[in-house]
Amino acid sequence: MLHLQRPGRFARRRARRVASVLFVAVGAALAPAAAAQAATVSVFPVPGGHVAAPATQITFRGVPASQLGSITVTGSKSGPHTGRIVADSDGNGGSFLPTQPFKAGETVTVGTGLSIAGVGGGTYSFVIANPAGAIRLAGVLPAPRVRNDVSRFISRRDLTPAAFTVTKKASASVAAGGDLFLGAQHGPLQNGPMIIGPYGGLIWFQPVPHNETATDINVQHYQGKPVLTWWQGNISSAGTGSGVDEIYNTSYEHVATVHAANGLGADLHEFTITGRDTALVTAYYPVLWNVSGAKGAKPRIVLDGVVQEIDIPTGLVLFQWDSLDHVPVTASYQAMPKDPGHPWDYFHLNSAQLIGNGDVIVSSRDTWGVYDISHQSGGIVWTLGGKSSSFKMGANTSFAFQHDARLLGHGLMTIFDDGGGPPAVHKQSRGLTLRLDTKHMTASLVVQDEHSPPVLAFYEGSDQLLHNGDSLLGYGSQPWVSEFDSHGKVVFDGRFVDANTCYRAYRYQWTGTPWAAPAFGTRTSKGKTTVYASWNGSTQLARWQVLGGSSPSKMSVIASANKSAFETPIRLRSSAAYLAVQALDSSGKVLAHTKPIKQ
């Protein structure tokens, strides 16, 4: 469930007040108001769905929870279910939380007095899938070691992030676009979200627990304030993730942890905070599925690609979409595994975007398709690419094994076209900007960005359109990050020193004011002492002052230096029994300081 750091006590009291109504499946409750009877209510799992989890909640959206009225829930194997209604934080719905889980393979019938979308009445049903167990986790495989592949600091010996080097330096105008937000996935010593300055150089790094990794390090807004977000957890042998989504503020303090719901673990591929302060997350659900349409002799383990919209304060599901309910396994370009014990990732969901009309744009790596999904019913509005494209694909617009599809204004869509398979479909990966004409149903090429020398990504990757018209490409399985101007010219190029991977790369303006104090360490050689000072995450730090004295109460400035990197060396001309450092901004104001430490 969700863990909120602030305001935890108030949120818990409110949740108890709105979640105290108990519904008995065969009994009556408050009669729904006339307005609720007239309103069309969306429900999840969707009517007629076949992939619900045994631990599923039953979501109702479109009327306040207090107007849901009498609800009966009956399983064909498990019988009547009791439960409770918990209200969504926006007041526009609620969920029935069963006291006991459902049974695999059974049909669940829900009876209400509401007008259910796509049903026309108040009674509908869905099927509980046959779960196929957990996906085997692969752990973190360190990248092969090479010289200078990690950064080390005397002031922060606890930090050993993967080293990043700039091969084409940004101009001042490009650097004005902001810092880079990355997450090396293969150590080799530590994984975690990191911020790299516009000219290179570490600004901030936070290690995640051993054998975990972090992806999709992003800057978003939550409750009107900028926040730093990422996914962290374990990655499976199928390239899926099982973990949680994190929200931190500009002081690098924990704000919230968002979990996937209905018994699923949050996947690494998407964590977006929507304009209505909800979370759009992805998950993978292994089920036993009839694959006879794909020439399978018997049910096989298939991965259902799941999109959930989560109410962050309550952790409730507001929307859920399951690929197996809407996209057949025959749409896949990914061959069924020969080993029946290995799950078939026929869809491989890798991005989800809530757009202005409420629909969700979903990208599937293994069907080579991008889908417009109705937020109300989960039905497919249109498909771009793949075996059954709704659009006539223009010259050079076809893509394969793509990632990070984003629908922008004026019918533009950006896509990172991996093309690497296996088997490889393209000779190199590229960033695509397409124009979609939904009146005439045509797709045309606006621009493509290609690296020189060619880079071919076999998985992952991103394409971010920046405010100045440039495009920032992260090459996923390859260690490169490149920025292209509107003419396709590379204006910035960088890479991890080793053969690391980074799921997505972003560039943003960022102001970080760490809650934690600065740090320093010392080294003495030939009687001369050098102080090494750092302040993990500060973007306003401009200058250091070293204080020295015979006691903590008798300290004065004995040396100073402009900030030169994540860690700044400051040579001392005289020794002192106690040392401390102060961090100053460009105007000379003291931002923070350390405690005096005896030498």
Image: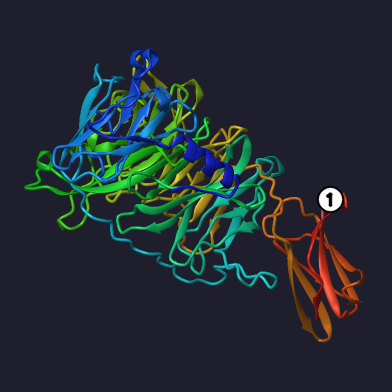
Say which quarter of the image contains residue 523: bottom right
Q: Residue at x 40, y 40 (%)?
A: 351
**View extreme (bottom): residue:** 526
Say which quadrant the C terminus sits in. Answer: bottom right
Say which quarter of the image contains residue 411: top left
The answer to whether residue 490 is visible is: no
- Would residue 321 be found to the left or right of residue 10 on screen? left
- Would residue 194 be found to the left or right of residue 237 on screen? right
- Looking at the picture, does residue 327 appear above or below residue 289? above
Say which quarter of the image contains residue 560: bottom right
**View extreme (left): residue:** 297
Q: Residue at x 24, y 20 (%)?
A: 119
Callout 1, which amino acid? Ser
- Which residue in the protein does label 1 denote? 586
The x, y position of residue 331, in whole percent, is 21, 36
The x, y position of residue 536, in whole percent, is 67, 59
The answer to whether residue 585 is visible is: yes
The x, y position of residue 353, in whole percent, is 44, 33
Mark 1 element type: loop
- Looking at the picture, does residue 405 appear above or below residue 113? below
